[in-house]
């Protein structure tokens, strides 16, 4: 008896045990507060991505460094990895064969006939035969879904980079606005002082002083608004990276508002660039393949699996051997409704893929046209700024020669600041257009060439 039970006892020793893993919000908050871009774990991650030890710690954080920070700390990427691992586990479990089933029964008869044995004992084993490779088709579908989940990791990584790029652009543009508004405020304070002195001397009116003060108040309000917006943008950057804003405040940002000269602009064949680089297209292809495997599975289900059940029974002193065969009667309706549903779902995926392709092609040309348009606008603003600065230099020379007064020079300087603000806005529009083109192509054109492998 011990020999018979020993395999079952040994198997029981390898049973998985349930381990509770409750979620503690307080622990999660503490874990978030401990996220540190200067930690050894993050530095080791940077070294694994090609950084040299002598380059650490990072002294200036540009888009590439911020992207690596997001890849390491942002929980969205960890979520994508967990979903991929769950899909991989599902694909592995779908490949398991049907486990044989043992059936046993014990009975006792109340028949008083002493010639009959009062007990009956029987058992049989159910062995299921996979007909038409249904298990393989289920595995094929699950593997395509797992591949789609794996590609979703790269998609999530790209989305993090895209959000960081835009937030960094907004942050650096807002910082430039603050600098220009501060400079403009200084000039306007000079003008208010000049008019006030003239009013005291009777050479100016109250109206002129009031108008100068209103302009100064308007500028102060815009400056305060931009300063408050900078705090919001800093929080946004920290959120995209998945770190506390207190950590970001200790990270010197590498800001560059000008368009990179080494930009890798795409060729005229934007359609090819877009369709070759988009991860969501590859995900859509895997999802279509999964639906196609599902259709093949429903077609295979027209042929029922067979269960063979050999058995033995001891019935009141008689030994009975048996062999049973069972299967679903799916051949009667040939699984027509399920096949029609799977075929329609495949058509839905095909239509969605075509719609996505069309959308991407349209976006590629639209975003590139926006880039060219904003680039031309920036050139015009830069030409106007160059001309204005040349005019300001002449006014400075005239002021030094005593031919104009301080008011005329300061008004010229305010006009220069106004054109500088327009040029900065045009630069930001161009940078945003470039980022949108990058996002459409899902290919870095300026700055970070971060690559992420699941």
Image (cartoon, rainbow, N blue to C red):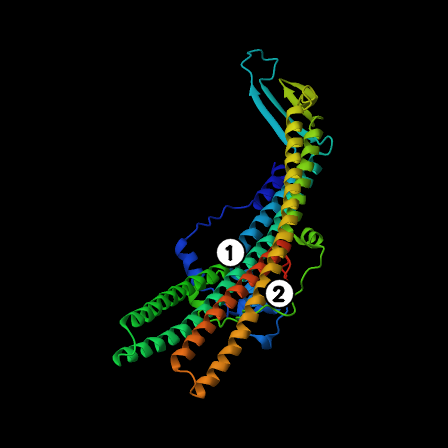
Secondary structure, mark 2, is loop
* 365 relative to 409 in the view: left or right: right
Give the image location of residue 390, x and y in percent. Answer: 53, 78
Estimate how packed mark 2 is, as few (under 14), some (14 to 19) or many (20 or more) residues with alpha carbons within 10 Å: some
Residue 149 vertical placement versus 380 (above, below):
above
Q: Quadrant of the N terminus?
A: top right
Residue 408 appears in the figure: yes
Residue 8 lies in quadrant:
top right
**Residue 406, quarter of picture:** bottom left
Residue, disc 2: 446
Q: CA distance from mark 2 to mark 1?
A: 26 Å
First in sequence, mark 2 or 1: give its number. Answer: 1
Judging depth in this view, the residue of 414 and 121 nearest the camera is 414
Q: Residue at x 65, y 66 (%)?
A: 263
Which percent across, then down, holds residue 133?
73, 34
Seen from this angle, which residue lies furthest bottom? Answer: 401
Q: Nearer the viewer, mark 2 or mark 1?
A: 2
Q: Is residue 180 above or below residue 333?
A: below
Can you tell which quarter of the image residue 447 is in? bottom right
Residue contact between numbered discs 2 and 1, judged by CB atoms under 8 Å: no
Residue 408, horizontal then vertical, whole percent: 41, 78
Position of 146 with respect to 409 (left or right) is: right
- Per the image, label 1 sits on a secondary structure element best described as helix
Q: What numbered label is drawn on residue 132?
A: none
Q: Residue at x 60, y 50 (%)?
A: 152
Question: Depth check: 276 or 134 in front?
Answer: 276
Write down the residue under mark 1: 75
Indicate whether 98 appears above or below 269. above
Q: Is residue 6 above or below residue 320?
A: below
């Amino acid at each position: 008896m011990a020999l018979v039970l020993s395999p079952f006892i040994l198997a029981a020793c390898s049973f998985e045990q349930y381990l509770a893993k409750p979620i503690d919000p307080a622990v999660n908050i503490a874990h978030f507060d401990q996220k540190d871009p200067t930690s050894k774990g993050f530095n080791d991650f940077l070294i694994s991505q090609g950084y040299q030890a002598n380059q650490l710690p990072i002294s200036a954080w540009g888009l590439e460094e911020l992207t690596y920070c997001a890849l390491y700390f942002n929980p969205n990427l960890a979520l994508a990895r967990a979903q991929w691992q769950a899909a991989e586990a599902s694909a592995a479990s779908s490949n398991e064969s049907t486990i044989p089933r043992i059936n046993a029964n014990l009975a006792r008869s109340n028949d008083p006939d002493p010639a009959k044995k009062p007990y009956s004992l029987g058992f049989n084993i159910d062995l299921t035969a996979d007909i038409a490779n249904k298990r393989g088709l289920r595995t094929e579908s699950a593997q395509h879904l797992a591949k789609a989940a794996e590609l979703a990791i790269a998609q999530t990584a790209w989305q993090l980079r895209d959000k960081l790029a835009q937030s960094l652009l907004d942050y650096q543009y807002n910082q430039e606005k603050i600098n220009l508004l501060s400079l403009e405020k200084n000039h306007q304070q000079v003008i208010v002082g000049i008019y006030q002195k003239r009013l005291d001397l009777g050479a100016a009116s109250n109206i002129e002083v009031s108008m100068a003060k209103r302009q100064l108040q308007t500028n102060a309000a815009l400056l305060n608004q931009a300063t408050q917006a900078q705090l919001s943008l800093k929080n946004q950057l920290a959120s995209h990276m998945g770190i506390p804003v207190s950590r970001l405040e200790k990270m010197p940002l590498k800001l560059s508002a000008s368009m990179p000269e080494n930009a890798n602009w795409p060729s005229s064949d934007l359609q090819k660039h877009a369709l070759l680089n988009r991860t969501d297209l590859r995900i859509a292809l895997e999802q279509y393949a999964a639906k196609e495997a599902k259709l093949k599975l429903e077609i295979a289900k027209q042929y029922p699996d067979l269960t063979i059940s050999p058995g033995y029974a001891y019935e009141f002193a008689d030994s009975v051997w048996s062999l049973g065969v069972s299967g679903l009667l799916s051949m009667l309706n040939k699984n027509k409704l399920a096949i029609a549903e799977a075929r329609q779902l495949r058509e839905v995926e095909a239509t969605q893929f075509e719609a996505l392709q069309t959308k991407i092609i349209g976006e590629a040309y639209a975003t590139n046209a926006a880039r060219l348009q904003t680039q031309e606008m920036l050139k015009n603003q830069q030409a106007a700024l160059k001309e204005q600065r040349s005019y300001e230099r002449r006014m400075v020379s005239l002021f030094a020669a005593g031919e104009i007064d301080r008011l005329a020079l300061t008004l010229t300087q305010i006009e220069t600041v106004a054109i500088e603000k327009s040029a900065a806005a045009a630069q930001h529009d161009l940078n945003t257009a470039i980022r949108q083109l990058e996002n459409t192509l899902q290919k870095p054109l300026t700055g970070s060439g971060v690559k992420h492998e699941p």
